[in-house]
């Protein structure tokens, strides 16, 4: 697309935007009585207006029915509390490119990472290694480190970290070469699908294929990818994945996470950390000895789900699934492409790749001189992004509720700084 640096041009793009009506389905926070420009959906997505009604419904069911509420069908979800997770499976499957049986909403992200590592990290003396990306999100690093130690290995010896090049980015070939070089001793490849700091999207399809060719298990943390870029976990042959729902999926602070376990593993009776909620549902309340898992991803559930959070998740998820990941990606590419173009014109150094295929909604601006002052200037102007010490401003226009006009206004404040 040929962009122009003018407010009229930005407004024209908004008029032509087929997804523009979705903005009205979210509350936009205000500052001095005016809507702020919220470019922080990569950290906490905004509240869907439908959220309050579903929570009020759940509260009134609890108030009026107590424990019977578990079986009272909520017309807003076509399921009772006992089945809210089932109501999430169809839209979740759409968003991550999976079959409904391969996904299940549950727990929170780092907890799920631990659960999945207990299944999919099966080190042996000859094959103990895990390949990951250096500087990945700290929680993921801690999870890997502690799993390695708990199995009696030394993280310094078995963790292979692929390092960024001078431009701060990771080359696909470096990951593929790393897999090939360590293939004989690798138990697992585990990494983010989209880097939280640089905004770089990794070629998950190619990485999964390389891992498969070498017979190595591969899993992704999709925290910054889900609802942001289309993924096709089933077709790519990814073994497992997890994510959170409070970033681009707008399911609320601390919202329900979810897991993907590929169909090819469903019959195998894989080892896992079990709990009663993963027990074969028709017989769960027989409360007998000896764990019998539910088929598919549901069999990794452990505990009674957090029902208000699950209810919010379903409501928010439906919006993303209805808009569709391909359409969201198309708008997102233009929105972030426009921001990228305007920032380049303003002489700002952007760490995120210039190749649109290698980025999602987020751009990471590197501002070594006066970065914090610029960030404060944005806040004064009613613009919310986020600041990472020592010199990085992350801005993420979200295609569900941000506009081209907002992109122009943000770049205008930056260019006049
Ligand atoms: C946001 C994020 C997390 C957060 O984990 P929680 O368990 O939800 O606190 C973990 N990993 C990555 C890559 C993230 O971006």
Image (spheres, rainbow, N blue to C red):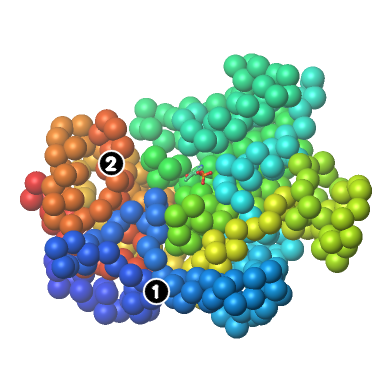
Does the rendering let one see residue 267?
no
Q: Give the mark toward the camera: 1 or 2.
A: 1
Count of marks overlaid on the render: 2
Direction bottom: furthest residue: 75
Residue 281 lies, in percent from the top left, at 82, 63
Residue, disc 1: 49
Which residue is tagged 2?
Answer: 387
Q: Earlier in the sequence, mark 1 or mark 2?
A: 1
Taking the view exactly as shown, the residue that stands out farthest to the left is 416
* Residue 23 vs residue 239, the one in the foreground: 23
Q: Is residue 88 left or right of residue 406?
A: right
- Seen in the picture, residue 9 relative to 346 is either above or below; the reply is below
Image vertical order of residue 56 relative to residue 292, above or below: below
User: Residue, x 73% and y 37% (percent of image)?
Assistant: 118
To which quarter of the image does residue 65 belong?
bottom right
Asked if ligand 1 lies within 8 A of label 2, the reply is: no
Of 20 and 83, the residue lying toward us: 83
Q: Residue at x 34, y 77 (%)?
A: 24
User: Is 270 located above or below residue 106 in the figure?
Assistant: above
Report how far apart the C-alphas of labels 1 and 2 lie in the structure. 28 Å
Where residue 180 appears, as percent x and y from the top left, is: 67, 30
User: In terms of image quadrants, where is residue 71?
Assistant: bottom right
Task: Say which element carries label 2.
Answer: strand
The answer to whether the residue labelled 1 contacts the one labelled 2, judged by CB atoms less than 8 Å apart, is no
Q: Quadrant of residue 85?
A: bottom right
Residue 112: x percent and y percent? 63, 45
In-front residue for pair 179/399: 399
Question: Does residue 200 appear anywhere in the picture?
Answer: yes
Q: Residue at x 19, y 37 (%)?
A: 371
| Disc 1 element | loop
Q: Residue visible at 70% across and 73% down?
A: 68
């Amino acid at each position: 697309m040929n962009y122009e640096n003018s407010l009229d041009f930005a407004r024209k793009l908004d008029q032509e935007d087929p997804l523009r009506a979705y903005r009205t389905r979210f509350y936009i926070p205000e500052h001095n009585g005016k809507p702020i420009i919220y470019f922080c959906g990569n950290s906490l997505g905004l509240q869907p207006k439908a959220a309050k009604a579903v929570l009020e419904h759940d509260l009134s069911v609890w108030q009026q029915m107590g424990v019977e509420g578990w079986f009272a069908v909520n017309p807003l979800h076509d399921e009772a509390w006992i089945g809210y997770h089932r109501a999430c499976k169809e839209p979740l499957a759409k968003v991550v490119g999976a079959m409904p049986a391969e996904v299940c909403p549950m727990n929170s992200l780092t907890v799920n990472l631990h659960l999945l590592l207990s299944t999919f990290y099966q080190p042996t003396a000859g094959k103990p290694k895990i390949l990951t990306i250096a500087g990945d999100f700290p929680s993921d690093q801690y999870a890997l480190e502690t799993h390695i130690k708990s199995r009696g290995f030394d993280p310094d010896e078995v963790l292979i970290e692929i390092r960024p090049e001078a431009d701060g980015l990771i080359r696909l070939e470096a990951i593929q070469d790393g897999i090939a070089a360590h293939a004989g001793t690798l138990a697992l490849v585990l990494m983010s699908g989209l880097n939280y700091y640089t905004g770089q999207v990794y070629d998950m399809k190619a990485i999964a294929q390389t891992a498969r060719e070498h017979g190595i298990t591969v899993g992704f943390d999709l925290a910054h990818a889900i609802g942001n870029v289309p993924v096709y976990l089933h077709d790519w042959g990814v073994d497992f994945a997890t994510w959170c729902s409070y970033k681009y999926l707008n399911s609320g602070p601390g919202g329900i996470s979810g897991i993907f376990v590929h169909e090819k593993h469903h019959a195998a009776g894989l080892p896992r950390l079990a709990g009663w909620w993963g027990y074969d549902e028709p017989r769960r309340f027989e409360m007998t000895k000896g764990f019998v898992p539910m088929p598919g991803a549901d069999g990794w559930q452990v505990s009674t789900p957090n029902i208000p959070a699950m209810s919010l998740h379903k409501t928010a998820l439906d919006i993303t699934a209805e808009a569709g990941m391909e359409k969201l990606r198309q708008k997102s590419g233009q929105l972030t492409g426009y921001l990228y173009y305007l920032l380049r014109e303003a002489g700002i150094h952007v760490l995120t790749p210039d190749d649109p295929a290698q980025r999602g909604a987020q751009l990471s601006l590197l501002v070594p001189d006066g970065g914090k002052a610029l960030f404060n200037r944005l806040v004064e102007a009613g613009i919310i992004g986020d600041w990472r010490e020592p010199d990085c401003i992350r801005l993420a226009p979200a295609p569900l509720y941000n506009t081209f006009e907002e992109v122009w206004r943000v770049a205008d404040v930056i260019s006049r700084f």
